[in-house]
Image (cartoon, rainbow, N blue to C red):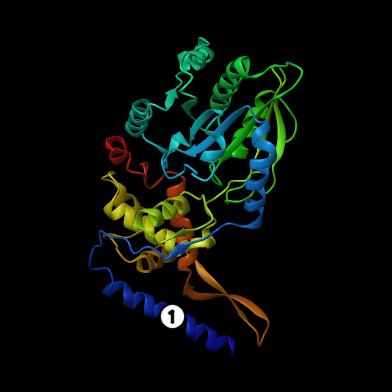
């Protein structure tokens, strides 16, 4: 195919999207058509879960579990729960900066209403009340705090909690207290470990990235000298598969994908953007959410069709597909709007908290069950 023919084909495809934008942006849907299956369970996760169960978790005195604040329920890994239910645990509801103050208060009410959790305030930590609470309320083995894994303040609070807990767990001062850091991929485990190490000026860093699945091996890091505390940075472990046994299961998978806990190519970036658009139109309680995405995409009306909306966003940001002409061995920028790159920009805008700061989980239902 010649260069001219390739350009003409790109223009034809763009014309089809323009035509569909006038036809498909009509009706609103309150029910999302979920994909049939979400399956992401690479070999390193299988190996990591086996090693956790046989080697590392038996050595860990305390579990430091990281959850996404926007997904207080969906970011619970039920495959890990049986392995850690008898150990003392601190849960960090991470990325709390992506929630509004009323949303944080709502999450706090959910935590305090649970008989399993003990929320630690700054006053509890500063006045050394944690060790006493652990001894007095042995059945409440799960502590909880809000945090931002990138911030020094969160690192200080977590380190202080671990020091207080070490007073009840560490039998020999010469041996390190082992803390296993667990959670779904991309919830901020390695970032938090680096913040803890920087707090005590300890060299070396855990590998971090914007994509899910960066940590592939279990690694040990020293985070504190006195008392001696080591943490185990573990790969995020996802469920073996989510099949469409119920819309609720697949909805959980789509929420995790939207927050970056799955690799984007597992579900498809356009599919994730479609779910986000449906959420902003039908589910969020932020009354300004539609206006925010309209302003970002440069449109003047509410959209229901993701390809149409991404066409407008791609046009606004000058995003075009890169093509390759085999006859001339030339790579060139076509005239076809790159809706997939536009979808990536759209999803990234949400992940930065610029489109919506709201729970994706419905904790109201959970609190009444």
Percent of width and height locating residue 117: 43, 27
Q: Nearer the viewer, residue 242 or 315?
A: 242
Give residue 191's quadrant in the image.
top right
Give residue 304's quadrant in the image.
bottom left
Q: Is residue 212 above or below residue 29?
A: above
Name the secondary structure under disc 1: helix
In this rendering, position of residue 318 left or right of residue 160? left
One can see residue 55 in this view? yes
Q: Is residue 345 above or below residue 115?
A: below
Q: Nearer the viewer, residue 298 or 50?
A: 50
Label 1 belongs to which residue? 13
Residue at x 46%, y 43% (from the top left corner): 75
Q: Nearer the viewer, residue 10 or 124?
A: 124
Residue at x 48%, y 80% (from the top left corner): 10
One can see residue 297 in this view? no
Badge count: 1
Percent of width and height locating residue 283: 29, 50
Percent of width and height locating residue 186: 55, 46
Percent of width and height locating residue 306: 36, 65
Q: Residue furthest top?
A: 127
Q: Quadrant of the N terminus?
A: bottom right
Residue at x 56%, y 24% (from the top left corner): 158
């Amino acid at each position: 195919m010649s260069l001219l023919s390739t350009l003409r084909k790109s223009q034809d495809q763009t014309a089809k999207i323009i035509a569909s934008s006038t036809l498909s942006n009509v009706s609103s849907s309150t029910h999302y058509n979920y994909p049939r299956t979400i399956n992401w369970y690479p070999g390193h996760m299988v190996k990591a879960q086996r090693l956790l169960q046989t080697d590392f978790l038996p050595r860990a005195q305390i579990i430091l579990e990281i959850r996404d604040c926007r997904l207080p329920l969906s970011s619970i890994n039920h495959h890990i729960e049986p392995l850690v239910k008898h150990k003392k645990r601190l849960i960090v509801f991470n990325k709390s900066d992506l929630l509004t103050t009323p949303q944080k208060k709502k999450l706090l009410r959910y935590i305090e209403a649970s008989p399993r959790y003990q929320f630690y305030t700054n006053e509890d930590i500063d006045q050394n009340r944690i060790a006493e609470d652990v001894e007095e309320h042995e059945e409440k083995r799960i502590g909880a705090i809000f945090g931002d894994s990138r911030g020094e303040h969160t690192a200080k609070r977590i380190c202080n909690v671990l020091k207080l807990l070490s007073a009840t767990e560490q039998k020999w001062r010469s041996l390190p207290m082992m803390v296993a850091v667990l959670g779904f991929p991309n919830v901020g485990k390695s970032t938090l470990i680096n913040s803890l190490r920087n707090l005590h000026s300890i060299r070396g860093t855990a590998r971090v990235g914007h994509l899910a699945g960066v940590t592939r091996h279990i690694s040990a890091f020293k985070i504190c000298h006195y008392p001696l505390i080591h943490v185990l940075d573990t790969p995020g472990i996802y469920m073996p598969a989510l099949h469409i046994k119920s819309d609720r299961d697949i909805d959980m998978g789509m929420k995790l994908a939207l927050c970056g806990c799955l690799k984007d190519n597992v579900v498809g970036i356009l599919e994730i953007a479609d779910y986000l658009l449906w959420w902003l139109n039908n589910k969020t309680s932020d009354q300004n959410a539609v206006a925010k995405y309209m302003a970002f995409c440069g449109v003047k009306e509410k959209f229901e069709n993701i390809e149409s909306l991404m066409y407008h966003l791609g046009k606004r940001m000058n995003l075009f597909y890169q093509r390759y002409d085999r006859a001339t061995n030339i790579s060139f920028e076509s005239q076809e709007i790159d809706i997939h790159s536009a979808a990536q920009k759209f999803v990234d805008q949400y992940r930065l908290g610029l489109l919506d700061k709201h729970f994706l989980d419905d904790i109201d239902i959970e609190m009444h069950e």
